[in-house]
Image (cartoon, helix red, strand yellow):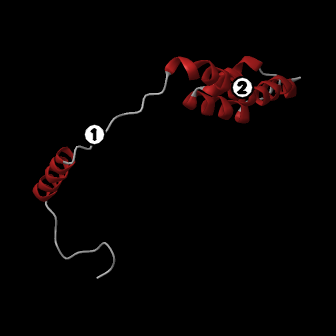
Amino acid sequence: MAAGVTDRLWSVEDLVVLWEAYEQRGRKSGVRHRRIQMPEGLFQPLHLLLIAIIGFVVLAPFWQIFKKAGFSPWLSLLTMIPLAGLFVLYYVAFARWPEKRK
């Protein structure tokens, strides 16, 4: 047979029994799973700074594109909202541009 393929059909009950046996084996061996907690206060300012830098890198080109096309540059803020950004890009792509209206 190919690797990982067996001729046995597993039922949910079989899987539950195997899982319970696995959990019991872990308790008997004394292995305890602990979550490693990162100190929140240490990385929070760095995290906020990184988000601000990435936000600026993403927003700056959209700000310039909307301003040069004659739209309000504030539309670039909507590009940070996942679905709203897609709608804004479609609106700008298919709307009559204010620069061409003159």
Residue under the point 43% across and 28% down: 37
Q: Indicate the quadrant containing the N terminus: top left, top right, bottom left or bottom right.
A: bottom left
Residue under the point 22% across and 43% down: 30
- On the image, the x and y values in percent for residue 101 come to 84, 25
Above or below — where is 7 with respect to 71?
below
Residue at the extreme front? 30
Which of these two is toward me, 81 or 11? 11
- Which amino acid does the dot numbered 1 rest on? Arg
Which of these two is toward me, 67 or 46? 46
Say which label, 2 or 1, has the lower sequence index: 1
Does 38 sit left or right of 94 as displayed? Answer: left
In the rendered image, which quarter is residue 57 located in?
top right
Residue at the extreme bottom? 1
Residue under the point 72% across and 35% down: 93
Q: Secondary structure at mark 1?
A: loop
Numbered badge on residue 15:
none
The 10 Å Cα crowd at callout 2, few under 14, some 14 to 19, many 20 or more, is few
Give the distance between the C-alpha atoms of the residues marked 2 and 1, in whole angstroms.
39 Å
In the rendered image, which quarter is residue 94 located in?
top right
Numbered badge on residue 32:
1
Which of these two is toward me, 100 or 89? 89
Question: From the viewer's perspective, is the residue at label 2 or at label 1 nearer?
Answer: 1
How many marks on residues?
2
- On the image, the x and y values in percent for residue 12 come to 14, 55
- Which amino acid does the dot numbered 2 rest on? Ile
Which of these two is toward me, 46 or 72? 46
Look at mark 2 in the image and give the residue it sits on.
Answer: 53
Above or below — where is 1 with respect to 74?
below
The 10 Å Cα crowd at callout 1, few under 14, some 14 to 19, many 20 or more, is few
- On the image, the x and y values in percent for residue 96 come to 77, 29
Does 79 sit left or right of 72 as displayed? Answer: left
